[in-house]
Image (spheres, rainbow, N blue to C red):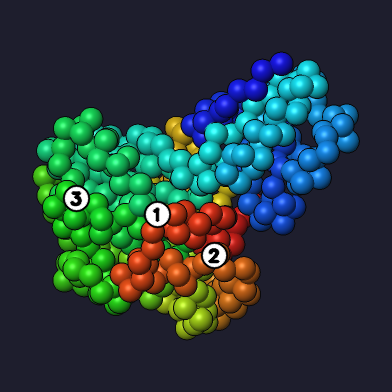
Amino acid sequence: MAVHALTAQQINEMIVNKEPFFLFDVRNESDFADWKIEGEHIEYLNVPYFELIDGVEPVLERLPKDKKIVVVCAKEGSSMMVADMLAEKGLEVFYLKGGMKAWSEYLYPVVVYQDNDIKVYQFIRVGKGCLSYMVVSGKEALIVDPSRFIDVYKEVAQKENVAITHIVDSHLHADHISGGYELAKQTGATYYLMKSEGAVFEFEPLENHDRIEFEKVSLEVLAIKTPGHTPGSVSFFVNNKLLFSGDTIFVSGLGRPDLGGKAREWAKDLYDTVYNKVAQIADDVIVLPAHYANFDQEVNEQGYIGNTLGNIRQMNEIMQGKTEEEFVEHVAQSASSETPPNFEDIIAINRGVKDATQEQQQELEIGPNRCAVHHTH
């Protein structure tokens, strides 16, 4: 039987289309437990490849005869080896091209909103749970929370026949490397970031702007400070219709404020954000966060991650009628979970005080997203 390669894009399409398949993950048990390809129609088996070097006979009876089998490893080599051995036993097998490294780096655009003034794309990075955005208006585009894969944004801008003129980061990201500075250098766009985040390269401080306006876009920098998990987290309110909430509000939870070691102190700021600033925003505003925790549970019928603020308030008990003391206690307890892997190095790179080669950036980013405080599920 033949062995076929599947790209991250093809596997993602299978997940989005709810196509059932069998995922045979041959990484170490700890890596599999920490982070894997997720989808509600996937069945799993995890056996480290080194246990299969002498042959795949021990696992044959655990593999289905009637489902697509996809073998996955960290970088591709081990999964190809195991897939070849299974094919020799008469099974039709697929493997993930580029391994989990490729899965970590794959992102794709979805149109989330369109009216006479603006068109908004969400870029979903499935392997990391990271979200970034493009707001197109007239001949210009704004990018929100860009990943380091800046060619993706340039390609969509070219397709839309617009120039990228404004780039904003809602905060110094802890789980992935921002493409904001590099994209600004390549496009000549203005790059905005909070001065309080301590970046050492050239940027335009968001503290100087209540609003950023271009073409038919009016972006309100929400009250300068809406902490998620850094003290300089901000949210962006566009045309009174869309709230780019960074790591402050997710579809299924709130940002975790403990990554600076000041969980209780920053949780008070988060309470003020949720109960005072965000409380003023209408229920029908669409919230578009910088992360998600569970694709199957957070993706909506239109195929993007987002929800109305009214629905999010209803789903999140922590956003309803809590005293500051109750809120801070809940957040402090939830926030004691594991921190994002390598977050100190990633923040240092995003601040501009540390350099990393492309290979080092890949290694630093591999692993799960751990930027949310709690989830309703």
Residue 7: image x %, image y %?
52, 31
- According to the picture, the residue beneath numbered tag 2 turns out to be 340
Residues packed near mark 2 inside 10 Å, few (<14), some (14 to 19) or many (20 plus): some
* Residue topped by disc 3: 186
Q: In percent of the image, x 45 and y 59: which residue is there?
A: 360
Choose mark 1 or mark 2, whichever is in front.
Answer: 1
Q: Earlier in the sequence, mark 3 or mark 1?
A: 3
Image coordinates of residue 109 in percent, x first then y, are 37, 36
Q: Which mark is residue 223?
A: none
**Between discs 1 and 2, the one toward the N terminus:** 2
User: Horizontal and vertical percent for residue 28?
Assistant: 72, 52
Circle 2/circle 3 CB separation < 8 Å: no
Q: Is residue 270 left or right of residue 79?
A: left
Q: 297 or 313: nearer the eye?
A: 297
Q: Secondary structure at mark 1?
A: helix
Q: Which mark is residue 358?
A: 1
- Kindly state the secondary structure of the residue where label 3 is placed: helix
The count of marks equals 3
How far is disc 1 from disc 2 in space, using C-alphas?
A: 19 Å
Q: Mark 1 Cα within 10 Å, few/some/many (few <14, many 20+)?
A: few
x 23%, y 70%: residue: 201
Residue 248 spot, x, y in % from top left:
43, 63
Q: Is residue 34 left or right of residue 194?
A: right
Q: From the viewer's perspective, is the residue at label 2 or at label 3 nearer?
A: 3
Compute the Cα span from label 3 to label 1. Answer: 17 Å
Q: Residues within 10 Å of mark 3 (few under 14, many from 20)?
A: few
Q: Amino acid at mark 2?
A: Pro
Q: Earlier in the sequence, mark 2 or mark 3?
A: 3
x 80%, y 22%: residue:
89
